[in-house]
Image (spheres, rainbow, N blue to C red):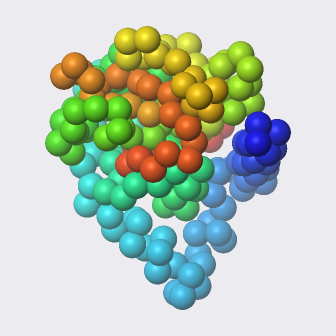
Amino acid sequence: MTLIIRKIAFVSFLALILCETIYGSAIPQSVLEISTEESTQSDNLLRKLASSKSSKSKEKVDKKYYVSPDKANWFKAFLYCVSAGLELATVESEAETDLLNEVLDKDDIKEGWKEGYWLSGNSLAYPETLEFYWASTGQKIIYTNWGKDQPDNAGKKEFCIGVGLVGKKPAWNDYAPETELKYICQSPRPCC
C-alpha cells in the first residue's frame, strides 16, 4: 500500500513539473479547453468554487482560498482543484493561517476533526519518518499549526494534512488519504 501511495504521489509530482516546464503553468490552456461533454463536471466544480466562501489577503498574502461545498478523498481533492485551474491549499505562515481562518468562519466550520478540510500537505513520500511536504509546491513544510498531540499517525496510515476546528480554534490534523473531507483550493502560484 505504501509503495503504491509513493508511486502515485511521485507520478502526480512529475506531471505537475512537466506541465509547468512545457506550458509555463501547471495546467496547459489546451487541457482547459476540453469538449462540452467532458466539461460538465469541471464547469459544475468551477461554479461551486466561484460561489464558495473566499477571502482576499490583508497582510501581503498573495493568494485567495476557496472552500469546496463537496467532500472528497485527498487525491480527488488535489485533482479537483487542479482541474479547476487552482491548487490544493498551502498554509505557510501565520498571516496565511489568519486568512484561512476567516474563510473557514464564513463557511461556518463545525467542531471536530471529522468536519475537517483538506490541505495539500502530506508525508506520502516519507511515511516512515512523517516528513511533510506541500504537494502544491513541493516545498518541505516549515510553518505548522498542528492541533494538540498531532500529528499522531493513528493506525500508521495518516499521511495527509487537513484543518479542523477543535477547541474553538482551527488547527491541523493528519488524516488517512481515503478520508472524505471538504477541501480548500487556492489561487495558483505564478510560475517563474
Identified at 82% across, 39% down, the residue is 3
Front one among 93 and 160 = 160
Q: Position of residue 87 (x, y in %)?
A: 52, 46
Quarter of image, res 142:
top right
- Residue 35: x %, y % from top left: 58, 85
Pick whichever, 162 or 2, lies toward us.
2
Give the quarter of the image for residue 128.
top right
Q: In which quadrant will I find the C terminus? A: top right
Please state the horizontal and vertical placement of residue 169, each as a whole percent of the image: 24, 21
Is 58 left, or right, of 47 in this rendering? Answer: left
From this view, report whether residue 83 is shown above or below residue 122.
below
Residue at position x 58%, y 75% in the image: 33
The outermost residue toward the front is 155
Q: Position of residue 53 (x, y in %)?
A: 24, 49
Q: Quadrant of the N terminus?
A: top right
Residue 168 seen in render: yes
Please report the residue visible at 74 percent of the width from the left and 24 percent of the height from the top. Answer: 126
Residue 159 appears in the figure:
no
Return the residue found at the far bottom: 37
Res 93 → quadrant: top left
Eyeballing the image, is 37 above or below 54? below
So how many labels did they put on this image?
0
- Identified at 43% across, 11% down, the residue is 149
- Is residue 25 or residue 105 the one in the foreground? 105
Q: Is residue 133 above or below residue 22?
A: above
State left or right for residue 68 relative to residue 38. left
Q: Nearer the viewer, residue 11 or 114?
A: 114
Q: Is residue 9 above or below residue 121?
A: below
Residue 185 horizontal side relative to residue 102, left or right: right
